[in-house]
Image: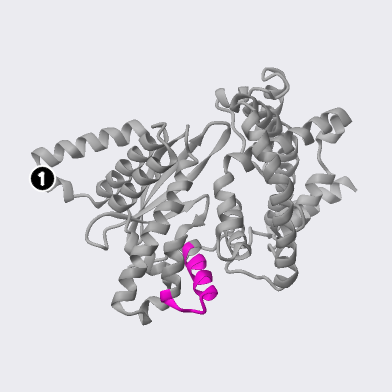
Amino acid sequence: MRNFLLIVIFVVLSACRVPLEDGISDPFEASNRQAHEINKSIDKNIIRPMAIVYGDITPIKLQSVANNMSMNFSLPRYSMNYILQGELKNASKSSMKFLVNSTLGVGGIYDFSSQLGLTSEKTDFGETMAKWGFREGPYLEILVLGPSNQRDGIGKVVDLVLDPVSLIGVGAKSVATATSVAFGLSARSQFRESIDSILYESADSYAQSRLFFLQNRRYELGTNKAEHYIDPYN
Amino acid sequence: MTVINSRRLFLASSLGAVFWPKLMVASEKDAATQIVYLAVHEINQIINSGNTEEQMLKSFEGVFNEYADVPTIAKYALGRDARTASATQLKDYTKAFSGYFATKYGRRFREFIGGRIEIVKVAKVKKYYSVNTIAHMPAYAPFEVDFLVSEQSGQPLVFNLIIEGVNMLLVERQEIGALLDRNSGKIDALIRELKAL
């Protein structure tokens, strides 16, 4: 059974190339816009005020420690996804980084491995599916989680459910969750004005969020079609 | 290209300007690099100056006016409506857009306080140069900012920014388009709203 699965994965991998994406597909715009309004009110009433308090009272060094720990806890997930993508070199890099930071970096408090030149690009199950040849599908704004698309929405759920950190123990998983919340608050606070500008100052915050998400995600995954050369001089 | 290399390149081209004025225009690539080098250098100074927000925004406006082709960005953002607008409307719109642009992007760059921008490499793409930089931030993973430089206006100027894949011209066309929709497609109303932002 296991061999069969491996064969399926490698056949899929060799048969597919990362699909290229172009334009905006948004057949669920009406319900997406409703979700967007709800997400905005969640941000306005809960996340943003919490982030401002967290960002203001927590010294940047301490935020950095929490952010490092959160990054460290993401590494087993990166390894798992790199294995599923057939990227064994990247998988060993992220595993090695996890080992080094968890030991010499004292449970991930210090990003010790970066000083040794050991870096790891982030990845997720959405990217794994893209490498298996799945298209991104329609744009989706998901409640609480925010802008996404069909493929990456499924990816987020898979990453949440199948996080290898859970195998280490419930304690590790809770610390991982806590530090990832801290990272989210820290980022919301640091990039407060950029995010506020999109959500609360733009003429159509839904369309701006969609544009930012789609372009940024395609850039991360390398799935944007050879960019149309925008020549504003013609 | 590292910061040191680009600094050396800048020094070399400044010396070139003194001793061999004609060498300056010999390489469009050097000119593109230099314009971004100067802009980035000034941005780095502003974000580490410890000045007030108001002072910083004023300084950023100076940087944008000197190194960016704001009228071209404004015209692109307006899209098709730029063709039907009268010369006076276009002039007023460009002026209003410049103010809006300076405040908006000044605030974006101000968030780099405590960080620095480093030039990594320069590549020619079709009719422009893409100057790839990395923004280093305390406590966050570094991210990429590409400055696109063209000489099509007659001198090397930045006409677009790509921040982690997000294309500023597309973002501004979407935003100005939405503002125009909100004002029932009336350019004069758009100009008033831009001035008020």
Q: Quadrant of residue A140?
A: bottom right
Q: Is residue B137 magenta?
A: no
**A220 or B53: nearer the viewer:** B53
Q: Residues within 10 Å of mark 1 (few under 14, many from 20)?
A: few
Q: Main secondary structure of the magenta part?
A: helix
Residue occupying the point 64% across, 39% down: A52
Q: Percent position (x, y) of residue B123?
A: 36, 50
Judge left or right: residue A203 versus residue A10.
left
Q: Quadrant of residue A2?
A: top right
Read off the chain for label 1.
Answer: B
Q: Percent position (x, y) of residue B117?
A: 42, 38
**B77 or A166: nearer the viewer:** B77
Q: Residue furthest right?
A: A1
Residue range highlighted in magenta: B172-188
Q: Quadrant of residue A146?
A: bottom right
Q: What colour scheme does the image use?
A: one colour
Q: Is residue B176 magenta?
A: yes
Residue occupying the point 32% across, 80% down: B86
